[in-house]
Amino acid sequence: MSRTGSHPVTPFARGVWVGLLATALIAMFGMGCGNKADGKPASGPHAQAGGGKPGGPPAEPPTHVAVNPATRGVAQQRYTTTATLEAENRAELLARANGVVAKFLVEEGDVVKVGQTLLLLDDSEAKVRVRQAEVELAKQKTIFDRQKASFEQQVIAQSEFDLARTNYEAADAALELAKHQLSYAHVAAPFSGTVVRRVANVGQTVNVGSPLFEIANFKPLLARIFVPAKELGTLREGQEAEISLDSNGDKLRGAVRLVSPVVDPSTGTVKVTVGIHEYPEGTRPGDFVHVSVVTARHENAIRVPNMAVFEDRGERVVYVANDSLASRRPVQVGFMDETHTEVISGLETGDRVIVKGQRTLKDGARIRILEEEKAEPTSSTVADRAGA
């Protein structure tokens, strides 16, 4: 029997309450599983992507770079051009007397010394003229001696004595001339050098002025270059020059011997003569060479590797490593050589300039340094290595 005012719980009602309770428990369990027990974001489709802000793009990984410190050293401006090697002394030897070529004592390629006989002409006729001059001189000397004695005894007049003396002196001069003519049969080298060309042949009749030999002195060799007057700068005598053979790249050592005091008005250039004392065996006049000379020099300049500097949006820029971030620096550049560029403004000594990986960077980008060069001592970076 039931109590007054109470209603019995039906099986249907009990099932509704159980279903509502189960739904609530499932919802609570789903909310609690959004985070792991350690408080870190859970993996899966509901987790944050790449460690970025919730709902944002993934963070970009750092760029791997190499850095090199900006150092101080010598910055140079060079003028490079081409030239043809020449011998300092080169001469064509000409016959100074008529005659027949009797004998050659040297050939092309022979090295000769100053005064060395190179060729003999038939000198038989010249020897006869010398003998005739000797006889005439002896005759005139006898007459002169007799007239002198008579003049001292006041037997002859002054005019007769003067004539005898004049004839004697003329005969003496004629003998000297004949001896000179005889010496011309021996053709000698006017300076030490190398025989580069022989023109005449044995048995050939030559006249005064006929070419016989050509000789040249290969030490030193010369390279004459023409530098624009506006680029002449501080070029001076004694300054070293870098020279290389066009044929094989061999290096030669040279120095400026002469800077012309005038400007060629037709070309606006100044002739500069470079002397070359040291060169590989086989180097000879006529070889084509590249010549490089320093026309300006800045001491204690800030220098960075050439690869660090590039053009971006109309500016010359470098990137500097500041801890783990890249900083974009517009710079003003000066002289540039084969390896380094002078930076006039925009950098300080010791700045860690990025030399690899910089072209893909942006200002403030994250970086990771994989290679880093150490700064050299100031004394070594300032040393001028030109011509070494």
Image (cartoon, rainbow, N blue to C red):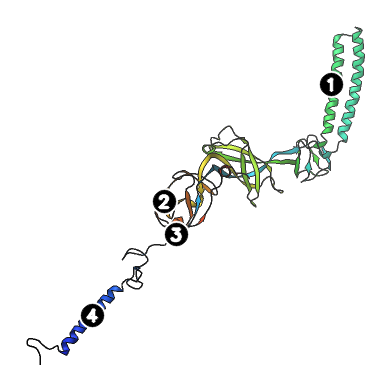
The residue wearing badge 1 is: 170
Q: Amino acid at mark 3?
A: Thr
Q: Secondary structure at mark 4?
A: helix
The residue wearing badge 3 is: 63
The residue wearing badge 4 is: 23
Using the numbered discs, state the Cα–Cα distance from disc 1 to disc 2 in whole angstroms. 94 Å
- Badge nearest the viewer, 1 or 4: 4
Q: Amino acid at mark 4?
A: Thr
**Residue at 79% of width from left, 41% of height from top?**
112
Q: Secondary structure at mark 2?
A: strand
Label 2 close to label 4 by CB (< 8 Å) = no
Q: Quadrant of the C terminus?
A: top right
- Badge nearest the viewer, 3 or 1: 3
Q: Amino acid at mark 1?
A: Ala
Using the numbered discs, state the Cα–Cα distance from disc 3 to disc 4 in whole angstroms. 51 Å
Mark 3 neighbour class, 10 Å CA radius: few under 14, some 14 to 19, many 20 or more: some
Please tell me which of labels 1 and 2 falls first in the chain: 1
Please tell me which of labels 2 and 3 falls first in the chain: 3
Label 1 close to label 2 by CB (< 8 Å) = no
Horizontal side of 333 relative to 17 (left or right) equals right
Q: Secondary structure at mark 1?
A: helix
Instruction: Give the vertical position of 170 relative to 337 (above or below).
Output: above
Mark 4 neighbour class, 10 Å CA radius: few under 14, some 14 to 19, many 20 or more: few
The residue wearing badge 2 is: 328
Q: Amino acid at mark 2?
A: Arg
Please tell me which of labels 3 and 1 falls first in the chain: 3
- Badge nearest the viewer, 1 or 2: 2
- Residue 164 x %, y %: 87, 15
Using the numbered discs, state the Cα–Cα distance from disc 2 to disc 4 in whole angstroms. 59 Å
